[in-house]
Image (cartoon, helix red, strand yellow):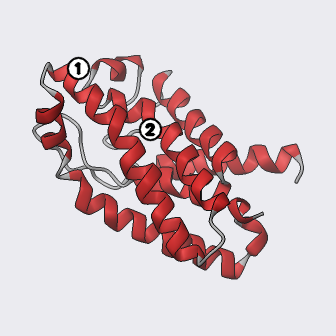
Amino acid sequence: MTKERELVLIALFAALIAALGLIPKINLGSGVPITAQGLGVMLCGTVLGSKRGFLAVALFVVLTLIGLPLLSGGRGGIGLLATPSVGYIIGFPFAAFATGFFVEKWSGNLTLGAFIGAVLGGIIVLSIPGIIGMAAILEKSLVVATGYALPFFPGDLVKAILAGLITNALYKARPAAVLSRA
């Protein structure tokens, strides 16, 4: 694969996360909204693999932090680092990396592997900095912040299922496009 193609795919998947931000967010009392953008983070890992997935999501995060209103609800800017969402924003690239790493190592059914990878990376790995960030900004214990995170999990499981199904469908249509399987 050429470097140019890699860069295009990284930019395309960063744009996918931004496009998923157009779906209206659901605000919660914790100050961290439920958005569709987690699906984009999962797909970066399941489709692009660990390194390219990380870079795509890191590009999205950098563009958001420099001020582009790419997060759901038109949020952007360095001030996001002082919100309860900080841990999730910082954790996004690592979630994509972990998701992609798992899918790269998985040799079984791709739908199942992408689903498991999305759960491990896009839910578990992402929840760790997310919960720590909420606890720090809201000045709550980790137990209380974990309670704030619980409403995310049912929707995140749906996103993980979708990531598995979409990744497998793309693989069947264009095997070479799923770089995590290359």
Q: Is residue 74 visible?
A: no
What numbered label is drawn on residue 49? none
What numbered label is drawn on residue 136? 1
Residue 73 percent location from the top left of the image: 30, 41
Give the residue displayed 22% in from the left and 20% down from the top.
137
Q: SS of the residue at dot 1?
A: helix
Task: For the C terminus, give its image quadrant.
Answer: bottom right
Residue 178 vs residue 114, the one in the foreground? 114
Residue 133 vs residue 31, the one in the foreground? 133
Residue 23 percent location from the top left of the image: 34, 55
- Nearest-to-viewer mark from 1 and 2: 1
Q: Amino acid at mark 1?
A: Ala
Give the residue displayed 38% in from the left and 63% down from the top.
159
Q: Amino acid at mark 2?
A: Leu
Instruction: Measure the alpha-carbon separation of dots 1 and 2.
Output: 24 Å
User: In the drawing, does residue 11 fall left or right of residue 77?
Assistant: right
Does label 1 or label 2 sit earlier along the sequence?
2
Q: Quadrant of residue 161?
A: bottom left
User: In the drawing, does residue 160 fall left or right of residue 4?
Assistant: left
Residue at the bottom extreme, as displayed: 172
Give the residue displayed 85% in from the left and 45% down from the top.
4
Q: Quadrant of residue 110?
A: bottom right
Residue for badge 2: 70
Q: Residues within 10 Å of mark 1 (few under 14, many from 20)?
A: some
Residue 40 position (above or below residue 149): below
Residue at the right extreme, as displayed: 2
Give the residue displayed 26% in from the left and 34% down from the top.
131
Task: For the N terminus, give its image quadrant.
Answer: bottom right
Residue 50 percent location from the top left of the image: 64, 47
